[in-house]
Amino acid sequence: MYEAILTYFQQNSGDYAMLVLQHLKVSGFSVLVALAIGLPLGIYSSFHEKLYNFFSGFFGILSVIPSLAVLFICIPIFGVGVLPATIALTFLAVPPILINTAVGFRSISGSILETAVGMGMDGGDIFRKVRLPLAAPMMLTGLRTAAVEVIASATLASYIGAGGLGDLIFTGLGLYRMDFLLIGGLSVAALSLLVDLILSLAEFGMTKYERA
Protein backbone atom coordinates (compact mmCIF):
# COMPACT_ATOMS: atom_id res chain seq x y z
CA MET A 1 0.00 0.00 0.00
CA TYR A 2 2.82 2.41 0.88
CA GLU A 3 4.47 1.75 -2.49
CA ALA A 4 1.19 2.35 -4.33
CA ILE A 5 0.70 5.69 -2.58
CA LEU A 6 4.30 6.71 -3.27
CA THR A 7 3.93 5.73 -6.93
CA TYR A 8 0.76 7.81 -7.22
CA PHE A 9 2.50 10.96 -5.97
CA GLN A 10 5.51 10.32 -8.22
CA GLN A 11 3.33 9.97 -11.30
CA ASN A 12 0.40 12.27 -10.53
CA SER A 13 1.71 15.08 -8.33
CA GLY A 14 0.38 17.71 -10.75
CA ASP A 15 -3.10 16.17 -10.88
CA TYR A 16 -3.15 15.88 -7.08
CA ALA A 17 -2.23 19.55 -6.65
CA MET A 18 -5.02 20.50 -9.07
CA LEU A 19 -7.56 18.47 -7.06
CA VAL A 20 -6.47 20.14 -3.82
CA LEU A 21 -6.76 23.59 -5.39
CA GLN A 22 -10.22 22.77 -6.77
CA HIS A 23 -11.30 21.57 -3.34
CA LEU A 24 -10.00 24.69 -1.62
CA LYS A 25 -11.47 26.97 -4.29
CA VAL A 26 -15.05 25.68 -4.06
CA SER A 27 -14.83 25.47 -0.27
CA GLY A 28 -13.31 28.91 0.17
CA PHE A 29 -15.73 30.64 -2.17
CA SER A 30 -18.71 28.98 -0.49
CA VAL A 31 -17.55 30.13 2.95
CA LEU A 32 -17.00 33.69 1.68
CA VAL A 33 -20.52 33.84 0.24
CA ALA A 34 -21.89 32.39 3.48
CA LEU A 35 -20.06 35.11 5.44
CA ALA A 36 -21.54 37.79 3.20
CA ILE A 37 -25.01 36.41 3.94
CA GLY A 38 -24.69 35.15 7.51
CA LEU A 39 -22.86 38.05 9.18
CA PRO A 40 -25.32 40.85 8.27
CA LEU A 41 -28.36 38.66 8.98
CA GLY A 42 -26.83 37.48 12.26
CA ILE A 43 -26.11 41.03 13.41
CA TYR A 44 -29.53 42.29 12.36
CA SER A 45 -31.41 39.40 13.98
CA SER A 46 -29.51 39.90 17.25
CA PHE A 47 -31.47 43.14 17.72
CA HIS A 48 -34.85 41.59 16.81
CA GLU A 49 -36.12 38.82 19.07
CA LYS A 50 -38.76 37.42 16.69
CA LEU A 51 -36.34 37.26 13.77
CA TYR A 52 -33.70 35.60 15.94
CA ASN A 53 -36.19 32.97 17.10
CA PHE A 54 -37.26 32.35 13.50
CA PHE A 55 -33.71 31.87 12.26
CA SER A 56 -32.83 29.63 15.20
CA GLY A 57 -35.80 27.35 14.57
CA PHE A 58 -35.56 27.42 10.78
CA PHE A 59 -31.86 26.65 10.56
CA GLY A 60 -32.15 24.14 13.39
CA ILE A 61 -34.55 22.13 11.24
CA LEU A 62 -32.40 22.52 8.12
CA SER A 63 -29.30 21.31 9.97
CA VAL A 64 -30.69 17.76 10.05
CA ILE A 65 -30.82 17.58 6.24
CA PRO A 66 -27.83 15.53 4.93
CA SER A 67 -25.31 17.34 2.74
CA LEU A 68 -25.84 14.91 -0.14
CA ALA A 69 -29.59 15.58 -0.08
CA VAL A 70 -28.96 19.32 -0.43
CA LEU A 71 -26.72 18.65 -3.41
CA PHE A 72 -29.33 16.49 -5.11
CA ILE A 73 -32.01 19.13 -4.51
CA CYS A 74 -29.86 21.68 -6.36
CA ILE A 75 -29.33 19.46 -9.44
CA PRO A 76 -32.82 19.86 -11.02
CA ILE A 77 -32.66 23.63 -10.47
CA PHE A 78 -29.07 24.52 -11.28
CA GLY A 79 -27.77 21.43 -13.10
CA VAL A 80 -24.37 19.92 -12.33
CA GLY A 81 -20.98 21.51 -11.86
CA VAL A 82 -19.42 24.11 -9.61
CA LEU A 83 -22.50 26.37 -9.34
CA PRO A 84 -24.88 23.90 -7.64
CA ALA A 85 -22.05 22.65 -5.45
CA THR A 86 -21.26 26.20 -4.33
CA ILE A 87 -24.91 26.95 -3.62
CA ALA A 88 -25.33 23.75 -1.62
CA LEU A 89 -22.16 24.31 0.39
CA THR A 90 -23.12 27.93 1.04
CA PHE A 91 -26.49 26.67 2.24
CA LEU A 92 -24.68 24.46 4.74
CA ALA A 93 -22.28 27.18 5.90
CA VAL A 94 -24.76 29.99 6.57
CA PRO A 95 -26.48 28.56 9.70
CA PRO A 96 -23.44 28.29 12.03
CA ILE A 97 -22.17 31.71 10.92
CA LEU A 98 -25.54 33.41 11.31
CA ILE A 99 -26.51 31.80 14.63
CA ASN A 100 -23.11 32.25 16.28
CA THR A 101 -22.99 35.87 15.17
CA ALA A 102 -26.40 36.55 16.65
CA VAL A 103 -25.53 34.73 19.88
CA GLY A 104 -22.27 36.65 20.14
CA PHE A 105 -24.03 40.01 19.98
CA ARG A 106 -26.92 38.94 22.22
CA SER A 107 -24.58 37.64 24.93
CA ILE A 108 -22.96 41.03 25.57
CA SER A 109 -23.71 42.18 29.10
CA GLY A 110 -26.10 45.10 29.43
CA SER A 111 -23.89 46.65 32.09
CA ILE A 112 -21.05 46.89 29.59
CA LEU A 113 -23.28 48.71 27.12
CA GLU A 114 -24.54 51.03 29.83
CA THR A 115 -20.96 51.85 30.77
CA ALA A 116 -20.18 52.64 27.13
CA VAL A 117 -23.18 54.99 26.97
CA GLY A 118 -22.08 56.61 30.22
CA MET A 119 -18.67 57.27 28.68
CA GLY A 120 -20.36 59.29 25.93
CA MET A 121 -20.14 56.77 23.09
CA ASP A 122 -22.77 57.01 20.37
CA GLY A 123 -24.38 54.01 18.64
CA GLY A 124 -21.68 53.70 16.00
CA ASP A 125 -18.85 53.82 18.52
CA ILE A 126 -20.55 51.24 20.73
CA PHE A 127 -20.94 48.90 17.77
CA ARG A 128 -17.36 49.26 16.52
CA LYS A 129 -15.52 49.48 19.83
CA VAL A 130 -17.67 47.38 22.16
CA ARG A 131 -20.18 45.08 20.48
CA LEU A 132 -18.06 43.90 17.55
CA PRO A 133 -14.86 43.08 19.52
CA LEU A 134 -16.82 41.23 22.24
CA ALA A 135 -18.87 39.27 19.70
CA ALA A 136 -15.86 38.46 17.47
CA PRO A 137 -14.78 35.23 19.28
CA MET A 138 -18.26 33.72 18.93
CA MET A 139 -18.41 34.85 15.30
CA LEU A 140 -15.07 33.16 14.69
CA THR A 141 -16.42 29.97 16.26
CA GLY A 142 -19.24 30.02 13.71
CA LEU A 143 -16.75 30.54 10.88
CA ARG A 144 -14.62 27.69 12.19
CA THR A 145 -17.60 25.33 12.33
CA ALA A 146 -18.76 26.34 8.86
CA ALA A 147 -15.32 26.05 7.25
CA VAL A 148 -14.65 22.56 8.60
CA GLU A 149 -18.12 21.37 7.60
CA VAL A 150 -17.78 22.79 4.10
CA ILE A 151 -14.35 21.24 3.50
CA ALA A 152 -15.70 17.85 4.52
CA SER A 153 -18.92 18.21 2.52
CA ALA A 154 -17.08 19.45 -0.58
CA THR A 155 -15.97 15.84 -0.99
CA LEU A 156 -19.56 14.96 -1.90
CA ALA A 157 -19.76 17.94 -4.26
CA SER A 158 -17.46 16.18 -6.70
CA TYR A 159 -20.30 13.70 -7.21
CA ILE A 160 -22.09 16.37 -9.25
CA GLY A 161 -19.05 17.52 -11.18
CA ALA A 162 -17.49 20.14 -8.90
CA GLY A 163 -14.07 18.46 -8.87
CA GLY A 164 -11.79 18.39 -5.87
CA LEU A 165 -10.46 15.58 -3.72
CA GLY A 166 -13.81 13.85 -3.87
CA ASP A 167 -12.92 12.84 -7.45
CA LEU A 168 -10.04 10.82 -6.08
CA ILE A 169 -12.24 9.17 -3.45
CA PHE A 170 -15.03 8.26 -5.87
CA THR A 171 -12.49 6.96 -8.39
CA GLY A 172 -11.03 4.79 -5.66
CA LEU A 173 -14.48 3.44 -4.85
CA GLY A 174 -15.18 2.68 -8.49
CA LEU A 175 -11.85 0.99 -9.16
CA TYR A 176 -11.47 -0.61 -5.71
CA ARG A 177 -8.23 1.32 -5.28
CA MET A 178 -7.50 1.57 -1.57
CA ASP A 179 -4.55 3.89 -2.23
CA PHE A 180 -6.86 6.44 -3.91
CA LEU A 181 -9.28 6.23 -0.99
CA LEU A 182 -6.54 6.73 1.56
CA ILE A 183 -4.93 9.65 -0.28
CA GLY A 184 -8.24 11.41 -0.83
CA GLY A 185 -9.68 10.74 2.62
CA LEU A 186 -6.54 11.64 4.52
CA SER A 187 -6.07 14.80 2.44
CA VAL A 188 -9.58 16.02 3.26
CA ALA A 189 -9.02 15.22 6.93
CA ALA A 190 -5.69 17.06 6.89
CA LEU A 191 -7.23 20.16 5.27
CA SER A 192 -10.06 20.16 7.82
CA LEU A 193 -7.65 19.83 10.73
CA LEU A 194 -5.36 22.53 9.37
CA VAL A 195 -8.18 25.05 8.91
CA ASP A 196 -9.59 24.16 12.32
CA LEU A 197 -6.16 24.67 13.91
CA ILE A 198 -5.61 28.05 12.24
CA LEU A 199 -9.03 29.37 13.27
CA SER A 200 -8.65 27.88 16.77
CA LEU A 201 -5.40 29.79 17.21
CA ALA A 202 -7.09 32.97 16.01
CA GLU A 203 -9.94 32.40 18.45
CA PHE A 204 -7.46 31.72 21.25
CA GLY A 205 -5.71 34.99 20.50
CA MET A 206 -8.99 36.92 20.57
CA THR A 207 -9.94 35.55 23.99
CA LYS A 208 -6.56 35.93 25.72
CA TYR A 209 -7.91 38.90 27.68
CA GLU A 210 -10.32 36.48 29.41
CA ARG A 211 -7.40 34.48 30.77
CA ALA A 212 -5.33 37.47 31.88
Image: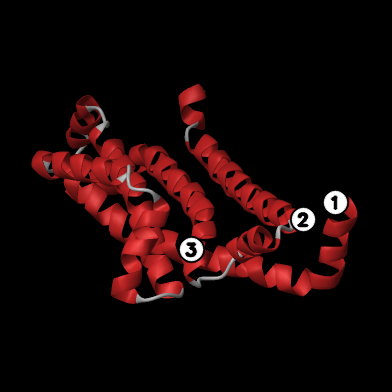
Vertical comparison of 71 with 136: above or below: below
From the image, tell me which residue sits under label 2.
Answer: 179
The mark that comes first in sequence, 1 or 3, is 1
Vertical comparison of 176 with 103: above or below: below
Q: How many marks?
A: 3
Q: Nearer the viewer, residue 171 or 34?
A: 171
User: Do the numbered discs 2 and 1 sit on residues whose CB atoms are within 8 Å?
Assistant: yes
**Left/right of residue 156 with respect to residue 189 in the rendered view:** left
Give how far apart the Cα atoms at labels 3 and 2 are: 21 Å
> In which quadrant of the rendered view does residue 140 lie?
top left
From the image, tell me which residue sits under label 1.
Answer: 1
Q: Is residue 31 visible?
A: yes
Q: Position of residue 66 (x, y in %)?
A: 38, 48
Q: How is the image coloured?
A: secondary structure
**Left/right of residue 198 with respect to residue 130 in the rendered view:** right
Q: Nearer the viewer, residue 118 or 201?
A: 201
From the image, tell me which residue sits under label 3.
Answer: 157
Instruction: Please state which amino acid type lies under the numbered disc 1.
Output: Met
**Left/right of residue 129 with respect to residue 163 in the rendered view:** left
Q: Is residue 121 visible?
A: no
Q: What residue is at 59 percent from the left and 61 percent from the top?
A: 166
Q: Position of residue 173 (x, y in %)?
A: 64, 58
> In which quadrant of the rendered view does residue 90 lie?
bottom left
Instruction: Please state which amino acid type lies under the numbered disc 3.
Output: Ala
